[in-house]
Image (cartoon, rainbow, N blue to C red):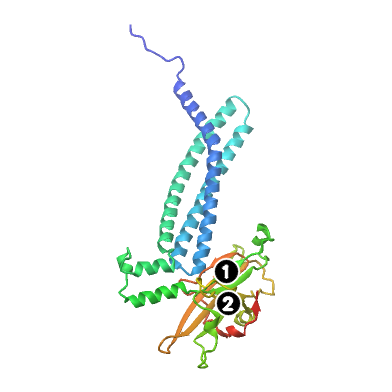
Amino acid sequence: MSTVFRPKNPNNVNLSRDDARNSMGRLHVGLGVFTYVLGFLAAAAGFNVYQGQWVQAVRSGNRGAQSGAMITMIASGGLALTNAYGFGNTLQAGFRVLMATKGEARKAAWVASGTRLGSVFFRSSWAGGLFTMQELAGAWLYNRYNTSAHDRWLQSTPWGLDTSRREDLTLQEFQHYLEVQQQAPFVEIKRSEDESFWQSMLSSAKTGDICVILPGLTVPDYQVTLEGRVSHALKIGAQRITTFLRGDRGIPVEQREVVTEQVQAGLYRVASKPEKEEKGPAPLLLKLTYPRNPEPVFGKVFEELLIELELQSLDDKGQLDRRNYRIRFNPTKGGRFLSANQHFEVNGEMSLLVVDVMALELSQ
């Protein structure tokens, strides 16, 4: 007579599965809180960095770098939302476990949280992987196009690594383009040391000392020669760009206003300090007074100034040579702002006025 073996507890399999889900629930809640918080903080920090890169690309007029920085911003924002989604579900599951009574009810809550948070972790992992790939692609695109004028000059030379960017120019032409880049004007803003960091973040923050430096040019270049001629001339144009939020969705919109006359009237020539003979003469340095908008703008985020400088000079043959540079900067932020790699799009041609360098008032 054969005997049939029967387990003492036919629900052992179900109990082991419940124990596993119970452990998974505890693991997801315990580690998920810290993991999602750290992931959110890392994504938020990356978004802040990428936003700064995008702003710098906008100021320099580099469209390729703008696209790369925008892609990385979207990716880091997606990563932040993904971690916030996981963190919210983890807190909700943990709260349900705490609200459950002890005993079988709490065990059932842990089992339910393990099942739910497992699916949340699966979806978050897929979304995080896609956003990470997008972030890497955006970083590659940004690094490819975020090159300085000197880098592009090196790539155009016969010893450049990228053969598609090499140009067939003479040695004199290469030297000329290098000289043009080295003499590109730039803006340097020095903020007050007494102003706190939080004050500088406000839209009503005071502007710093705005200096326009023209390397390669000195004050004697704008003096009248013995022949009664001037070998160099300077023109300037300016637009005030106000960025504000419009509509319920808060879409950023730019409002532009030509302020060339105000900027020209607020220029001063900074008296250069005596330099040592081996350093050579000091470059021409102008101080600019920012024409703040007197009327309050509802929803204003910040104001920027876009200036265009036209440098005119006579070559050895007496021909007039013009070089135009555009610089966009926030007058409330300190730092150095270089000339644009490309011309910024403006609404119509920017009016340029002549600047009599020698007639400008001196400022210390």
| Mark 2 neighbour density, 10 Å: few (under 14) some (14–19) many (20 or more) | many
Task: Name the image quarter holding residue 333.
Answer: bottom right
Query: Is residue 349 depicted above or below 273 in this figure?
Result: below
Q: Is residue 139 above or below residue 113?
A: below
Horizontal and vertical percent position of residue 229: 51, 91
User: What amino acid type is highlighted by mark number 2?
Assistant: Gln
Q: Residue at x 44, y 46 (%)?
A: 126
**Residue at x 52% of width, y 45% of height:** 39
Q: Position of residue 353 (x, y in %)?
A: 57, 85
Q: Is residue 186 above or below residue 23?
A: below
Mark 1 residue type: Glu
Assess disc 1: are there few (<14), some (14-19) or many (≥20) residues with their C-alpha within 10 Å of its C-alpha: many
Number of numbered tags placed on the structure image: 2
Q: Is residue 320 left or right of residue 237?
A: left
Q: CA distance from mark 2 to mark 1?
A: 18 Å
**Residue 285 in which image quadrant:** bottom right
Q: Position of residue 146 (x, y in %)?
A: 44, 63
For disc 2, the marked residue is: 239
Report the disc number at residue 188. 1
> Is 3 or 85 nearer to us in this picture?
85
Mark nearer the viewer, 2 or 1? 1
Label 2–label 1 contact, CB within 8 A = no
Quadrant occupied by the N terminus:
top left
The residue sitting at the front extreme is: 277
Q: Residue at x 53, y 64 (%)?
A: 55
Q: Is residue 157 above or below residue 314?
A: above
Which labelled disc corresponds to residue 19?
A: none
Per the image, label 2 sits on a secondary structure element best described as: strand
Residue 299: percent from left, percent from top:
65, 66
Quadrant containing the C terminus is bottom right
For mark 1, give the secondary structure: strand
Picture residue at 43% right of the left edge, 47% below the top: 129
